[in-house]
Amino acid sequence: MSGLGAAGYTLTTDPQPRGGARLRHAQPQPRTIVWPLYVYGHNDHMLFTQRWRELATAFTRTLRVGPDGRRTPGTLTIARPDGTSRSVRVFYREGFDGQGKRGSGLVSDAVALVLWCEDPYWQDTQPVTVHREQGVGRDYLAPYPSVSSSQVLGATTLAVPGDAVVWPEWRITGPASEITFTHDDTGEAFTLDPSKTGHGNLAAGEQVTVRTDPAQIRLQDGTADGVNWMSALNWPEGVLWGLAPGQNAVRFELTGSGPGSAVDLTFYPRYETA
């Protein structure tokens, strides 16, 4: 097998006046995996044939266009003895044609599958989740001076394991009249203004989901897809930013927040190798 190591990169460089060049950009390239597969039928030709056909269909199905006009990749997962596992999304390219030598194809055969990956990075099969919620306030002077216990929506630090930038999914729970998320390390930010959708303020208990890759903003209304809220984003200034490996200083600002206002963040760490 091959293709389980670090991703390949295309480097963009600028020639330097005194010789050599300076690296301007590194673009990760799609990954190709060669995966040997042995198919057998316990000395039963028809059992082998059934398995052979079903496996061929399963792999080539990744190339079919569905009702939504898109192709759905398969998932290759590699599990390690310590219980950890990493996966990558794959499309079948070639290789499911057998050895083509005497004796093969009767009750067993072997193939060398070539799988193509749009995203070259492996990702953890277990997500990382972060929750921040506005607590219920109390009167500072009743019955005596006190401070409410809560996780304040504001500045926070997010720790991201792995080797590559992750593109998180955010779930915002109301109440809120305006939502701004800022990455203090890069200065990138985006703002959601519910009034631009004609909906009005996000009410208590209502939720909006923001996906950063591919970009998608949906009001959850109980249906499978929700309501398209892309018009709430402050185009073109808004940037649906990612999180780099390591520590990330970010700020969550919910104008008009109150008890129950919350931000939930979910992402899968990404790695160079399996």
Image: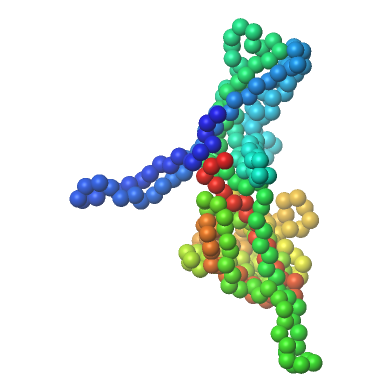
Q: How many marks?
A: 0
- Residue located 61% across and 56% down the image: 168
Nearest to the observer: residue 245 or residue 140:
245
Q: In this image, 47 relative to 271: left or right?
A: right
Residue 117 position within the rendered picture, expressed as x and y whole percent measured from the top left:
55, 37
The relative height of residue 186 versus residue 75 in the rendered view (above or below) is: below
Q: Position of residue 10 (x, y in %)?
A: 41, 41
Location of residue 129 by image quarter: bottom right
Colouring style: rainbow
Q: Image quadrant for the N terminus?
A: top right
User: Between residues 266 and 39, which one lies in front from this camera angle?
Assistant: 39
- Check the picture and name the quadrant holding the C terminus: top right
Where residue 76 sits, quadrant-wise, is top right
Q: Find residue 135 and report its horizontal and vertical position in percent.
A: 73, 76
Residue 23 lies left or right of residue 30; in this view the side is left
Percent position (x, y) of residue 163? 52, 50
Res. 252 visible in picture? yes
Name the residue: 69% across, 25% down. 55
Q: Which corner quadrant of the image does residue 78 belong to?
A: top right
Q: Residue at x 73, y 91 (%)?
A: 145
Does residue 200 show up?
no
Furthest toward the left, the residue is: 18
Where 232 falls versus 81 (above or below)? below
- For residue 235, side relative to residue 217 (left or right): left
In the current view of this chain or complex, which residue is farthest to the top? 102
Q: Residue at x 52, y 56 (%)?
A: 245
